[in-house]
Amino acid sequence: MRPLIVIPGRRSPQVSVLRFSGTIASEAMCEAVWAAGGEPLILHGPDADPADDLAARLSRFDGVVMPGGGDMDPARFGETPAPEAEPPMAHDDDLDFEVAAVVLSVGLPTLAICRGLQVVNVALGGTLHQHLPDGEVAHRNAVHDVVAEAGSRLRAVAGRDRLQVSSYHHQAVDRVGRGLTVVARAADGCVEALEHDSGRLLAVQWHPEDLHATNDTDAALFADLVERAAKHAADR
C-alpha cells in the first residue's frame, strides 16, 4: 500500500473544467508524490471545520505536503500589507494554519513548500519579509542555487551541499520561528529551507515539484517524505 500523503487544497473561485468553484492541487505536486511512491490526496477545507475535527481527519493520513499559494494576511504576523502584497485568501489562510498546528502538535511527517514554509514559520512566531527587492538572486520565476548546511537533514537527503532549485516567490522568512533552524540559504542570504526540532518537518522555499522528474535532489525530497510517512504508518 502506498503511504497516504494529503495536500491541503487551494480554493479557486473558477476552474475551466468545472461549472463552479473548485478545491485544487497542482498536477505537478500530485505527480511528484506519486513518482516517489506515495498516494496523493487533496484535503478539503470546509468553511466551518472545528480544529478537533481536522486533527481527527489528518490522523487518517501518513504524511502531509503543505503546498505553495498566494500571500498570507500579514496580520498573522502583526503587520499591515505592503504595497506589493497580494490580497490574502482567508479560507486558505485558515486551513493552512490549522493544518500547521496539527502537524506540529502530533509530529505528522511533513514537507512544506514555499508558502507552506512561510505558514509554518509564522505559526511558530516568526515573521516574513513582505517583498524581496530585486538583487543578485532572482527569486520569482527563476532557477538558482542554494547551499545546504552541513549536518542538516536537507544535506543528508539531497546528498550534496549546493542545490539548483526552481523558485517562485516574492516573500521570505525574516525572523525565524520557535523550534526552527535555517538549513539552506541563497547567495543573497535569503532563507531557503527550515527544519523543525522534532525531525518530522522539512520546509523549503523553492518548488521541488517543478523539476522533480529531472532533478534528483528535488525528487529526493519527496522520496524522503514518503519514506518517513511509510515508517509513521508502520509505527501506528
Image (tube, rainbow, N blue to C red):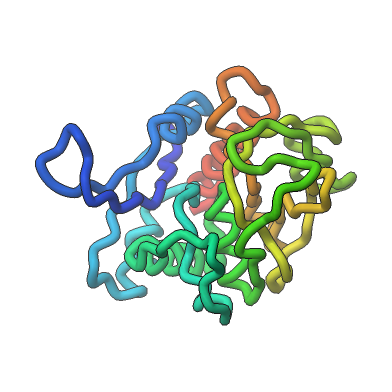
In the picture provided, is 147 more to the left or to the right than 172?
right
Q: Position of residue 65 (x, y in %)?
A: 49, 47
Q: Residue at x 53, y 66 (%)?
A: 83
**Residue closer to the observer: 226 or 88:** 88
Query: Residue 179: where, in percent of width, then height?
Result: 72, 69
Q: Quadrant of the N terminus?
A: top left
Instruction: Kindly tell me whether residue 49 is visible in this rendering.
Output: yes
| Residue 118 falls left or right of residue 102 | right
The relative height of residue 39 versus residue 203 in the rendered view (above or below) is above
Where residue 132 sits, quadrant-wise, is bottom right
* Residue 90 horizontal side relative to residue 154, left or right: left
| Vertical position of residue 144 compared to residue 125: above or below | above
Residue 105 in the image: state x and y as whole percent. Answer: 54, 70
Residue 99 as seen in the image, left or right of residue 46: right
- Place residue 56 in its image quadrant: bottom left
* Residue in front for this viewpoint, 155 or 57: 155
Residue 64 at least partly seen: no
Q: Residue at x 13, y 46 (%)?
A: 20
Q: For the view shown, which residue lies furthest in the right direction?
A: 150
Farthest-out residue, bottom: 78
Q: Residue at x 59, y 60 (%)?
A: 118
Residue at (57% x, 81% y) in the render: 78
Q: Position of residue 176 (x, y in %)?
A: 72, 68
Seen as rendered, the residue at the extreme top is 214
Indicate whether 119 appears above or below 165.
below
The mark total stands at: 0
